[in-house]
Image: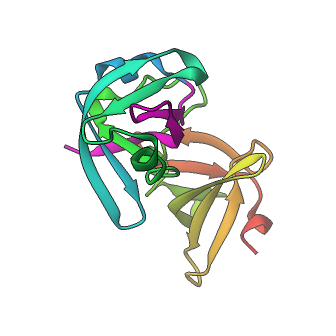
Amino acid sequence: MSQVIVGKIRTSHGVKGYLKVFSTSGEYDHYADFETVVLQKGRRSKTFEVEDVTGSGAGTLIKLKGIDNPEEGKLYAGYDILVDEEFKAECGEGEYYQTDLIGCDLIFDGKKAATVINMVYGGPDDLLEVKRTDNEAVVLVPFRNEFLGDVDIAKKTIELRVDWILD
Protein backbone atom coordinates (compact mmCIF):
# COMPACT_ATOMS: atom_id res chain seq x y z
CA MET A 1 0.00 0.00 0.00
CA SER A 2 1.32 3.45 -0.81
CA GLN A 3 1.86 6.08 1.83
CA VAL A 4 1.16 9.81 1.89
CA ILE A 5 2.68 12.68 3.82
CA VAL A 6 0.03 14.02 6.19
CA GLY A 7 2.14 16.29 8.34
CA LYS A 8 5.44 17.29 9.83
CA ILE A 9 6.88 17.07 13.33
CA ARG A 10 7.40 20.58 14.68
CA THR A 11 9.09 19.86 18.04
CA SER A 12 8.57 18.02 21.30
CA HIS A 13 6.07 19.03 23.97
CA GLY A 14 6.14 18.32 27.70
CA VAL A 15 8.19 15.78 29.59
CA LYS A 16 6.59 12.56 28.28
CA GLY A 17 7.76 12.79 24.66
CA TYR A 18 4.64 14.15 22.99
CA LEU A 19 5.27 15.75 19.59
CA LYS A 20 3.69 18.89 18.14
CA VAL A 21 2.48 18.27 14.62
CA PHE A 22 1.75 20.43 11.60
CA SER A 23 -0.86 18.98 9.24
CA THR A 24 -0.03 19.47 5.57
CA SER A 25 -3.74 19.22 4.73
CA GLY A 26 -4.92 21.57 7.48
CA GLU A 27 -7.02 18.72 8.90
CA TYR A 28 -6.21 17.17 12.26
CA ASP A 29 -9.19 15.00 13.20
CA HIS A 30 -7.93 12.01 11.22
CA TYR A 31 -4.76 11.81 13.37
CA ALA A 32 -6.86 9.97 15.99
CA ASP A 33 -7.31 7.12 13.47
CA PHE A 34 -3.58 6.42 13.05
CA GLU A 35 -2.28 3.17 14.52
CA THR A 36 1.23 3.49 13.10
CA VAL A 37 3.14 6.27 11.38
CA VAL A 38 6.43 6.51 9.57
CA LEU A 39 8.68 9.47 10.36
CA GLN A 40 10.90 10.27 7.41
CA LYS A 41 13.56 12.85 6.61
CA GLY A 42 15.65 12.35 3.52
CA ARG A 43 16.70 8.70 3.43
CA ARG A 44 16.11 8.17 7.14
CA SER A 45 12.80 6.68 8.21
CA LYS A 46 11.42 4.86 11.22
CA THR A 47 8.02 3.30 11.92
CA PHE A 48 6.31 4.03 15.24
CA GLU A 49 3.20 2.78 16.98
CA VAL A 50 0.86 5.63 17.95
CA GLU A 51 0.13 5.60 21.69
CA ASP A 52 -2.00 8.73 22.00
CA VAL A 53 -3.31 11.76 20.12
CA THR A 54 -4.53 14.74 22.11
CA GLY A 55 -5.46 18.37 21.52
CA SER A 56 -7.08 19.77 18.42
CA GLY A 57 -6.25 21.89 15.41
CA ALA A 58 -2.79 23.42 15.46
CA GLY A 59 -2.53 22.27 19.10
CA THR A 60 -2.63 18.59 18.17
CA LEU A 61 -0.03 16.43 19.92
CA ILE A 62 0.95 12.86 19.09
CA LYS A 63 2.66 10.35 21.40
CA LEU A 64 4.71 7.64 19.70
CA LYS A 65 5.88 4.45 21.39
CA GLY A 66 9.60 4.67 22.10
CA ILE A 67 9.78 8.47 22.28
CA ASP A 68 9.49 9.06 26.01
CA ASN A 69 11.13 12.40 26.72
CA PRO A 70 11.59 15.81 25.07
CA GLU A 71 15.20 15.12 24.10
CA GLU A 72 14.19 12.07 22.04
CA GLY A 73 11.27 14.01 20.55
CA LYS A 74 13.46 16.89 19.39
CA LEU A 75 15.54 14.44 17.34
CA TYR A 76 12.52 14.09 15.01
CA ALA A 77 11.79 17.81 14.50
CA GLY A 78 11.35 18.46 10.78
CA TYR A 79 10.51 14.84 9.94
CA ASP A 80 7.56 14.17 7.64
CA ILE A 81 4.69 12.05 8.99
CA LEU A 82 3.58 9.35 6.56
CA VAL A 83 0.57 7.05 6.85
CA ASP A 84 -1.07 4.48 4.62
CA GLU A 85 -3.13 6.20 1.93
CA GLU A 86 -6.41 4.94 3.43
CA PHE A 87 -5.91 7.30 6.42
CA LYS A 88 -5.38 10.53 4.49
CA ALA A 89 -7.85 13.35 4.99
CA GLU A 90 -10.27 14.09 2.18
CA CYS A 91 -9.16 16.95 -0.03
CA GLY A 92 -11.39 19.91 -0.67
CA GLU A 93 -11.76 21.61 -4.02
CA GLY A 94 -8.38 22.82 -5.26
CA GLU A 95 -6.49 20.78 -2.65
CA TYR A 96 -4.13 17.95 -3.54
CA TYR A 97 -1.68 15.64 -1.87
CA GLN A 98 1.94 15.92 -2.92
CA THR A 99 1.94 12.26 -3.92
CA ASP A 100 -1.01 12.91 -6.27
CA LEU A 101 0.81 15.74 -8.05
CA ILE A 102 4.15 13.98 -8.51
CA GLY A 103 4.19 12.35 -11.93
CA CYS A 104 1.61 14.72 -13.42
CA ASP A 105 2.44 16.21 -16.82
CA LEU A 106 2.27 19.98 -17.36
CA ILE A 107 0.32 20.55 -20.58
CA PHE A 108 0.73 23.76 -22.61
CA ASP A 109 -1.22 24.24 -25.84
CA GLY A 110 -2.17 20.55 -25.85
CA LYS A 111 1.45 19.36 -25.60
CA LYS A 112 3.44 17.94 -22.71
CA ALA A 113 5.91 20.60 -21.55
CA ALA A 114 7.23 19.09 -18.30
CA THR A 115 6.61 16.48 -15.62
CA VAL A 116 6.31 17.09 -11.88
CA ILE A 117 9.13 15.28 -10.06
CA ASN A 118 8.81 16.77 -6.57
CA MET A 119 7.17 19.45 -4.49
CA VAL A 120 8.98 22.03 -2.39
CA TYR A 121 7.35 23.93 0.46
CA GLY A 122 8.61 27.43 0.98
CA GLY A 123 7.66 31.06 1.23
CA PRO A 124 4.15 32.08 0.34
CA ASP A 125 3.68 29.37 -2.31
CA ASP A 126 4.29 25.69 -2.73
CA LEU A 127 6.60 25.03 -5.66
CA LEU A 128 6.39 22.22 -8.19
CA GLU A 129 9.81 20.89 -9.14
CA VAL A 130 9.41 19.92 -12.79
CA LYS A 131 11.60 18.38 -15.47
CA ARG A 132 11.20 19.97 -18.89
CA THR A 133 10.35 17.65 -21.75
CA ASP A 134 12.55 19.35 -24.35
CA ASN A 135 15.88 19.54 -22.53
CA GLU A 136 15.31 17.78 -19.17
CA ALA A 137 16.21 20.95 -17.25
CA VAL A 138 14.73 21.03 -13.75
CA VAL A 139 12.86 24.22 -12.80
CA LEU A 140 10.53 25.37 -10.02
CA VAL A 141 6.99 26.49 -10.83
CA PRO A 142 4.89 28.26 -8.18
CA PHE A 143 1.61 26.42 -7.55
CA ARG A 144 -0.48 29.51 -8.34
CA ASN A 145 -3.46 30.26 -10.58
CA GLU A 146 -1.41 32.69 -12.67
CA PHE A 147 0.78 29.84 -13.89
CA LEU A 148 -1.30 26.67 -13.51
CA GLY A 149 -4.88 25.90 -14.42
CA ASP A 150 -6.98 22.74 -14.27
CA VAL A 151 -5.54 19.80 -12.36
CA ASP A 152 -6.80 16.36 -13.38
CA ILE A 153 -5.44 13.79 -10.94
CA ALA A 154 -7.15 10.91 -12.79
CA LYS A 155 -5.44 11.85 -16.07
CA LYS A 156 -2.25 12.96 -14.26
CA THR A 157 -2.25 16.35 -16.03
CA ILE A 158 -1.95 19.97 -14.98
CA GLU A 159 -2.72 22.84 -17.34
CA LEU A 160 0.25 25.18 -17.79
CA ARG A 161 -1.07 28.67 -18.51
CA VAL A 162 2.23 30.32 -19.47
CA ASP A 163 5.23 28.53 -20.94
CA TRP A 164 7.79 31.23 -20.12
CA ILE A 165 7.74 30.10 -16.46
CA LEU A 166 9.81 27.07 -17.58
CA ASP A 167 12.68 29.27 -18.86
Residue 2 falls inside the magenta stretch: yes
Residue 126's place in the image compared with 96, above or below, is: below
* Point 40% across, 36% down: residue: 17
> What colouring style does the render use?
rainbow
At which x and y percent is residue 75?
A: 44, 54
Percent across and percent down for residue 120 are 60, 57
Quadrant of image for the C terminus: bottom right
Q: Nearer the viewer, residue 93 or 163?
A: 93
Residue extending farthest front: 15
Residue 142 in which image quadrant: bottom right
User: Observer-nearest residue: 58 or 148?
Assistant: 58
Q: Who's the residue at 38% across and 23% down the image?
A: 31
Per the rendered image, the range of residues in magenta is 1-26
Q: Residue furthest left?
A: 1
Residue 66 in which image quadrant: top left
- Residue 121 visible in this rendered orientation of the protein: yes
Residue 141 lies, with reference to residue 18, above or below; the image says below
